[in-house]
Image (cartoon, coloured by chain):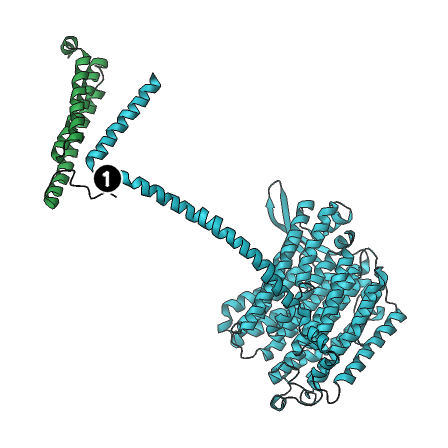
Chain colours: A cyan, B green
């Protein structure tokens, strides 16, 4: 565990080498990036082994390795290093594994693109930053890598930089997350001023012991939460994620599904002891998560772009993770994060396979691809069902744990009822996109004719992820955990330190109702969109008004536009008047004009006649002499 | 030197130099011919030199500071007049006049 820093160091090397030499390397150097990524992934296992051993010996609270970073003599010493515990380990595994598969997949998907080498360089940099983010033992390093993943996200969303919409989506993602990031920075600064350290563990200890004044702690928690909300695309900063789908699909799978967007979840999970001592904070986190979940579920029902449906399902999932965190169910949230990484990456990569094969992503033009894509279609369906949470796929177990966690979290029953309501809706829109894409009549004969299964580098990562999407949920069981070399099941491995390790047990009421609701959603979906369904229009026929509301994403973007037009720009106009009248006309031009006027008056002394000057000199001498004598006398 | 100092009081030198200086000032202010202005300036310089030598002899006969300064003044005056006359010459060549009232291009 002491050498965990090697994990991000390898992709950094890949980034530098590819950036400098990729044009001269065979295949633009993609093999180099994949090789380094694979090594990094391989190195997670020794760390996992160490962690499992340490837990087996008991009393494991994470291992911190740090060295001096910089030092202001006599005031503060900042140390930098890595911190590895169970949460970190899960993140390391997810990030390196999905990144490796995405890189392999991209050799097919991105083949022949203009900036192929650059793509691999930036993905390498992204992975390095993400690994640094989850390994960081102090908030300063975390913030650096937090911004770096944001930068990489922006660069990759805008990968097709000759496309106006992609450039604008990149800008939107960057600016929207920046709104949250400013909060995060302020939160970090507040914590530093209160505790005089950036070290996460020390800050958490101080917070739990009540060493931070209540009002400062509340301010810091709210600020840090805003960072997490921006990065994890929670309401009200969720608007950037659907637009981020302008990026290449492998990027959406890696950054906007499996890794970067869960950085916010990671941050909240990491700082949970701090959030939990602030009154009202768990409720706030839960409320944001619930709003996001419901919003995304309804919007997902009406979207026509296959990738956007999956993007809204990501919002849906992220909302659920926040709900779990709000209830203090760290284990459930991390389990959902873990399984979500597989089935959501699977969904995105399968989307990419469809887009690659048909060059079309509107469900209105797809359809009947089942027979044409014998690998992609079943894999997409597995992903969709896992997302819907059908037993026994991985999504079910994670969602079940969240429900149990919420039940035990002691929050109002409204929370659990709302989560239960979202389940059939999730199932409904997932089955909708499956039916419209892979079944029914081919809506565009030309597209259907040219569709084909993708080549092996793209299809076998799908199969691997599909397998994990099926089985990864089983880690909740004691037996599976022990078979994998850990001493317990998932909930005994990652748990809220305030509550201690738990074992898996079935809550029959919740399990039966969740399965029933999901099945009901799927059946309703089959009934609506099955057979000869005319796409989207039939859904709209139920209630055109509601349909328009969903289709237009509850007009949140429009509301922001209005707010910008009428609040930001109006304030801007007032400030512009001040700037024009006071700063420019009075301050800047006024200085110039005054100088000019004085010069205009003063210029008349320059007569050009020597006797005038001579007289002035004489008078001057006389005056000075008179004054000097006056003083003496 | 001692003889002069006993026969003529210091005030006489000061009065002479003052008169000379005033004549110089009057010349600089009243004359319009550049050469005459230069000559008046020389008068002023000479008045200063007289002052310096006189004070040197009367107040600190063992030191030669004032006398050395007078020599400096003479040297610099020579150089200055050389330069100034050259300028006057050029002005006269270019504009056909040495009247300073007519040479006033450098103005607002």
Can the viewer see residue B37? yes
| Residue found 20% across the figure and 44% down from its top | B105
Q: Is residue A626 left or right of residue A128?
A: left
- What residue sits right under mark 1 in the picture? A607
Q: Which quadrant of the figure has residue A428?
A: bottom right
Can the viewer see residue A10? no
Disc 1: which chain?
A
Q: Is A138 situated above or below B22?
A: below
- The spot of residue A105 in percent (x, y) is 63, 77
| Residue found 71% across the figure and 70% down from its top | A296
From the image, which quarter does the N terminus of chain A lie in? bottom right
- The spot of residue B52 in percent (x, y) is 20, 20
- The spot of residue A446 in percent (x, y) is 60, 90
| Residue found 80% across the figure and 67% down from its top | A418
Q: Is residue A213 left or right of residue B88?
A: right
Q: Is residue A165 left or right of residue B1?
A: right
């Amino acid at each position: 565990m002491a050498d965990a820093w090697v994990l991000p160091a390898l992709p950094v090397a890949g980034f530098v080498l590819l950036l400098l030499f990729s044009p001269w390397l065979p295949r633009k150097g993609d093999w180099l990036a994949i090789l380094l990524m694979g090594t990094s992934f391989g190195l997670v296992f020794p760390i996992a082994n160490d962690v499992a051993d340490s837990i087996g010996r008991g009393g494991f609270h994470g291992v911190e390795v740090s060295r001096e970073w910089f030092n202001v003599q006599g005031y503060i010493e900042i140390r930098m290093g890595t911190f590895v515990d169970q949460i970190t380990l899960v993140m390391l595994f997810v990030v390196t594994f999905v990144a490796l598969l995405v890189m392999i997949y991209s050799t097919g998907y991105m083949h022949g693109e203009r900036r192929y080498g650059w793509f691999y360089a930036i993905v390498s940099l992204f992975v390095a930053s993400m690994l640094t983010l989850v390994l960081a033992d102090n908030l300063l390093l975390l913030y650096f890598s937090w911004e770096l993943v944001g930068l990489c996200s922006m660069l990759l969303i805008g990968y097709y930089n000759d496309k106006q919409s992609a450039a604008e989506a990149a800008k939107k993602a960057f600016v929207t997350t920046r709104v949250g990031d400013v909060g995060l920075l302020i939160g970090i600064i507040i914590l530093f001023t209160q505790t005089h350290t950036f070290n996460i563990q020390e800050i958490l200890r101080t917070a739990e012991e009540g060493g931070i004044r209540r009002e400062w702690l509340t301010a810091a928690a709210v600020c840090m939460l805003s960072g997490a909300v921006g990065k994890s695309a929670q309401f009200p900063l969720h608007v950037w994620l659907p637009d981020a789908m302008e990026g290449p699909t492998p990027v959406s799978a890696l950054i906007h599904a499996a890794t970067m967007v869960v950085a916010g979840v990671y941050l909240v999970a990491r700082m949970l002891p701090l959030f939990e001592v602030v009154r009202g904070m768990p409720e706030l986190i839960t409320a944001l998560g619930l709003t996001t979940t419901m919003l995304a579920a309804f919007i997902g029902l009406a979207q026509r772009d296959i990738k956007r449906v999956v993007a809204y399902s990501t919002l849906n999932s992220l909302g659920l993770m926040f709900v779990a965190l709000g209830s203090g169910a760290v284990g459930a949230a991390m389990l959902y994060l873990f399984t979500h990484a597989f089935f959501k990456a699977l969904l995105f990569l399968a989307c990419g396979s469809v887009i690659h094969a048909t060059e079309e992503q509107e469900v209105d033009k797809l359809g009947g691809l089942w027979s044409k894509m014998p690998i992609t279609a079943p894999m997409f369906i597995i992903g969709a069902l896992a997302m819907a949470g059908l037993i026994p796929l991985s999504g079910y177990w994670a969602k079940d744990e969240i429900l149990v966690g919420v039940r035990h979290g002691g929050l109002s029953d409204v929370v659990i009822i709302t989560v239960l309501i979202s389940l059939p809706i999730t199932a409904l829109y997932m089955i909708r996109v499956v039916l419209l894409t892979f079944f029914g009549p081919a809506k565009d004969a030309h597209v259907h004719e040219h569709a084909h299964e993708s080549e092996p580098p793209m299809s076998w990562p799908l199969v691997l992820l599909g397998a994990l999407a099926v089985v990864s949920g089983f880690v909740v069981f004691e037996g599976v955990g022990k078979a994998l070399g850990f001493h317990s099941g998932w909930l005994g491995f990652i748990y809220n330190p305030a509550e201690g390790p738990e074992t898996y047990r079935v809550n029959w009421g919740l399990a039966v109702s969740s399965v029933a609701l999901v099945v009901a959603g799927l059946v309703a979906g089959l009934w609506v969109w099955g057979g000869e369904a005319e796409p989207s229009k039939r859904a709209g026929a139920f209630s055109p008004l509601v349909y328009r509301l969903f289709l237009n994403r509850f007009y949140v973007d429009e509301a922001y536009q209005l707010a910008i037009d009428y609040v930001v720009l109006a304030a801007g106009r007032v400030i512009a008047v001040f700037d024009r009248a006071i700063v420019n006309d009075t301050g800047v031009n006024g200085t110039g004009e005054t100088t000019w006027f004085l010069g205009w008056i003063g210029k008349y002394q320059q007569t050009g006649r020597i006797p005038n000057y001579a007289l002035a000199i004489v008078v001057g001498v006389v005056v000075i002499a008179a004054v000097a004598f006056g003083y003496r006398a | 030197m001692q003889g002069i100092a006993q026969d003529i009081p210091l005030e006489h030198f000061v009065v002479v130099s003052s008169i000379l200086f005033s004549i110089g000032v009057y010349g600089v202010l009243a004359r319009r011919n550049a050469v005459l202005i230069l000559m008046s300036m020389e008068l002023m310089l000479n008045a200063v030199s007289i002052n310096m030598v006189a004070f040197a002899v009367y107040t600190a006969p063992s030191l030669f500071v004032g006398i050395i300064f007078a020599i400096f003044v003479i040297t610099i005056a020579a150089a200055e007049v050389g330069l100034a006359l050259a300028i006057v010459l050029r002005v006269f060549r270019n504009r056909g006049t040495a009247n300073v009232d007519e040479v006033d291009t450098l103005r607002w």
